[in-house]
Image (tube, helix red, strand yellow):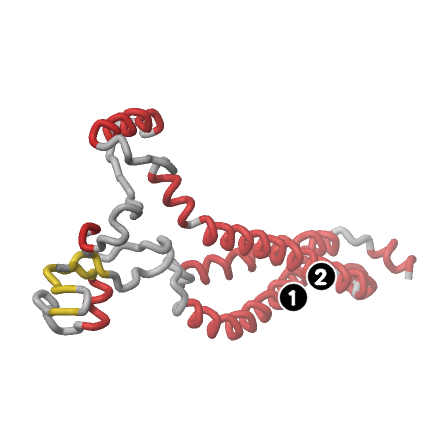
């Protein structure tokens, strides 16, 4: 007699009732829910469950997991659990005792490591993008300093010139975001095939775009402020 999980039933008995079917491992007597044995970030695989006593060759050496639920902190219950198990069978060895929070963390350590690395690289990319955009805006202001000085000498409003520099920087950032969106869309579709939950969605993409525009505005704010403080006499004399 065996029990199968939902993943196996969906794969091999789609649209059928598998209960009562005879396999080479035994007769199916029930279907249970999926359990993610490999890792929590991976989908459940098809599995067959049967009593350990049916496998006589492994009954003496097979290892099992004991899960204990408690209302209080689990850290101080290891000795009590060992004592209870020892009363049942002194030959049973209990090892690798850990709380469920640590079990979950151990299962997701690889995914968390990848997320941490991706987050670090994303922060580095944002920093370099802000520095690069600031450099482009600052160079543009320096190259056009004589032009801005002449405009100010002829009566242009310093605030209007500042907005001109700011709009140019934001326009460059918007063009870069549009190009990045076109390139990233196939990658987002490709990520849907990976066994990762809570993947990128519209809210994440929108929030990222707004954040990048805010960084671009902040990077262009200093060059725009510099334009507003240009002294036409000093700038033209330097030329």
* Alpha-carbon span between mark 1 and mark 2: 8 Å
Q: Looking at the rendered structure, which numbered label has been put on residue 168?
A: 1
Residue drawn at point x = 75 percent, y = 64 percent? 140
Q: Is 27 left, or right, of 173 in this rendering?
A: left
User: For the residue carrying disc 2, how many other residues have a C-alpha within 10 Å: few (<14), some (14-19), or many (20+)?
Assistant: many
Res 161 visible:
no
Residue under pointer 2: 137
Q: Quadrant of residue 97?
A: top left
**Residue at (60%, 56%) from the top-left corner?**
126
Along the viewing direction, whichever of 171 and 148 lies nearer the viewer: 171
Q: Is residue 228 left or right of residue 189?
A: right
Compared across the picture, whether 164 is left or right of 189 comes to: right
Q: Position of residue 102 (x, y in %)?
A: 39, 40
N-term mark: 1 or 2: 2
Task: Specify the quadrant of the image occupied by residue 44.
Answer: bottom left
Q: With respect to residue 107, does 180 lie above or below?
A: below
Q: Quadrant of the C terminus?
A: bottom right
User: Does dot 2 land on a helix, a strand or a loop?
Assistant: helix
Measured as percent of width and height from the top left, residue 80 is found at 28, 25
Q: Residue at x 41, y 66 (%)?
A: 194
Displayed quadrant of residue 27: bottom left
Percent position of residue 200, x then y: 42, 62
- Give neighbour class at mark 1: few <14, some 14-19, many 20+ (Cα, 10 Å): some
Element marked by disc 1: helix
* Residue at 66% across, 57% down: 128
């Amino acid at each position: 007699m065996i029990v199968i999980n939902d993943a196996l039933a969906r794969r091999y008995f789609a649209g059928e009732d598998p209960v009562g079917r005879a396999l080479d491992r035994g007769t199916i007597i029930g279907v249970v829910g999926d359990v993610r044995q490999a890792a929590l970030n991976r989908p459940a695989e098809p599995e067959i469950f049967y009593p350990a006593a049916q496998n006589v060759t492994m009954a003496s050496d097979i290892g099992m997991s004991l899960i204990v639920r408690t209302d209080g902190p689990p850290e101080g219950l290891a000795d009590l659990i060992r004592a209870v198990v020892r009363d049942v069978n002194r030959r049973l060895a209990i090892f690798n005792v850990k709380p469920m929070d640590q079990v979950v963390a151990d299962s997701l350590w690889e995914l968390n490591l990848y997320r941490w690395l991706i987050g670090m690289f994303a922060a580095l990319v944002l920093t370099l993008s802000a520095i690069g955009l600031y450099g482009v805006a600052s160079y543009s202001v320096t190259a056009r300093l004589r032009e801005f000085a002449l405009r100010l000498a002829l009566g242009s409003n310093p605030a209007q010139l500042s907005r001109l520099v700011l709009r140019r920087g934001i326009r460059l950032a918007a063009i870069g975001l549009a190009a990045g969106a076109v390139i990233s869309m196939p990658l987002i579709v490709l990520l849907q095939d990976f066994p990762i939950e809570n993947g990128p969605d519209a809210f994440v993409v929108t929030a990222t775009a707004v954040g990048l525009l805010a960084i671009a505005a902040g990077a262009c704010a200093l060059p725009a402020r510099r334009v507003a403080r240009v002294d036409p006499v000093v700038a033209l004399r330097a030329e």
